[in-house]
């Protein structure tokens, strides 16, 4: 772990230390049986071919269903109480996995998907927002740590959407490729916020930025990736993610292979487009996005009705209460 932690979401590569009150890491006996054991190894597969032609909304299943778990370290904290009141944990985790796999692996062979075996959401009192880490002994077991203090800090009207949005962002880190860790952190964080954006969980304070580099990360890079879809197709982020599978990040090669030009030129063009759009909006008096003058961590008090309502299905609305330490296996319910 680097000594300087980003103030927003963090990705950690070192294992979390376990306190004496913490249950031991998942045992192999607790895992669901392996499926599709005959699948070739990822490196042996060409994922560029489309073997699962399907609509955008179809579900993408990994070769092996991950075990999903929830760990609550302090039931009495306001953040944990809010989580239990607002979020149905099993549905939220399953939906996050579904959204990530659909957006990163649609129309690709399942062997392109990392062999993540379990994802444990740990709610605990900590600084920051959230981070994702792999277990020391087996990186295929992921833990998403989400701060109860942060949940408490979010205005009540935004809490549910924010929890689900952060969950989707962190879930990306459980399933994305990173060129063996050589990809710029800003790119992997940008992919995570691009997925969050596409899944419908962009918070109202997000906006397009051009006063930064392309790999500034988070929504800055996320909106840039969204813009790339316009000229390079809806699967451009899938191509980028795929290019980071099984080989190191090489800037010139990756961007030329995926977009046919350099990242410098792409970013320049994006900046121009956004700035031109901004000028138009200014002269017409209409803002392109909900603005926020504050930092990334700040969550606006403003309510965006579209954000509040669009993504809650009747099923989600009806669900209240939560699960505690209940292993959940996706795909066994509707
Ligand atoms: Zn992240």
Image (spheres, helix red, strand yellow):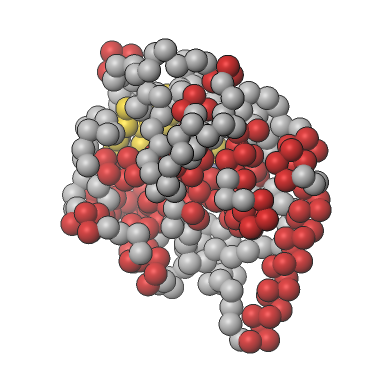
Residue depicted at x 59% and y 74%: 288
Residue depicted at x 59% and y 25%: 46
Position of residue 9 relative to residue 18, above or below, is below
Position of residue 26 relative to residue 203, above or below, is above
Q: Position of residue 325 (x, y in %)?
A: 23, 32
On the rendered image, what quadrant is the C terminus found in?
Answer: top left
Q: Position of residue 8 (x, y in %)?
A: 55, 49
Q: Is residue 36 left or right of residue 285?
A: left
Relative depth, front residue between 128 and 130? 130
Q: Position of residue 84 (x, y in %)?
A: 24, 49
> Can see residue 37?
yes
Residue depicted at x 46% and y 39%: 53
Q: Residue furthest bottom?
A: 284
Relative depth, front residue between 310 and 308? 310
> Can see residue 211?
no
Q: Is residue 37 left or right of residue 49?
A: left
Position of residue 269 relative to residue 32, above or below, is below
Relative depth, front residue between 316 and 7? 316
Q: Quadrant of residue 301?
A: bottom left
Q: Position of residue 195 (x, y in %)?
A: 50, 48
């Amino acid at each position: 772990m680097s000594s300087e932690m980003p103030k927003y979401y963090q990705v950690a590569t070192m294992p979390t230390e376990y306190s004496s009150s913490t249950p031991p890491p998942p045992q192999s006996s607790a895992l669901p049986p392996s499926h599709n054991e005959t699948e070739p190894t990822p490196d042996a597969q060409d994922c560029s071919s489309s073997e699962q032609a399907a609509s955008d909304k179809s579900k993408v299943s990994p070769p092996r269903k991950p075990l999903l778990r929830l760990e609550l370290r302090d039931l009495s904290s306001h953040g944990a109480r809010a989580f239990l009141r607002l979020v149905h944990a099993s549905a939220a985790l399953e939906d996050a996995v579904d959204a990530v796999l659909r957006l990163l692996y649609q129309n690709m062979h399942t062997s392109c998907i990392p062999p993540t075996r379990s994802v444990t959401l740990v709610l605990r009192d900590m600084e920051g927002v959230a981070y994702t880490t792999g277990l020391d002994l087996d990186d295929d077991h992921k833990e998403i740590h989400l701060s109860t203090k942060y949940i408490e800090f979010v205005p009540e009207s935004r809490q549910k959407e924010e929890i689900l949005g952060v969950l989707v962002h962190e879930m990306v880190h459980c399933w994305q490729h990173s060129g063996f860790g050589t990809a710029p952190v800003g790119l992997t964080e940008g992919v995570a916020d691009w997925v969050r954006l596409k899944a419908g969980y962009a918070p109202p304070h997000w906006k397009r930025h051009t006063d930064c580099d392309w790999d500034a990360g988070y929504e800055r890079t996320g909106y840039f990736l969204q813009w790339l879809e316009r000229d390079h197709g809806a699967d451009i982020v899938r191509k980028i993610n795929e290019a980071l599978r099984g080989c190191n990040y090489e800037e010139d090669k990756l961007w030329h292979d995926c977009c046919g030009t350099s990242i410098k030129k792409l970013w320049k063009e994006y900046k121009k487009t956004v700035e031109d759009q901004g000028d138009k909006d200014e002269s017409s008096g209409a803002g392109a996005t909900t603005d926020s003058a504050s930092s990334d961590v700040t969550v606006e008090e403003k309510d965006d009705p579209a954000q509040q309502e669009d993504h809650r299905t009747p099923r989600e609305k009806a669900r209240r209460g939560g699960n505690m330490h209940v292993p959940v296996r996706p795909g066994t319910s509707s």
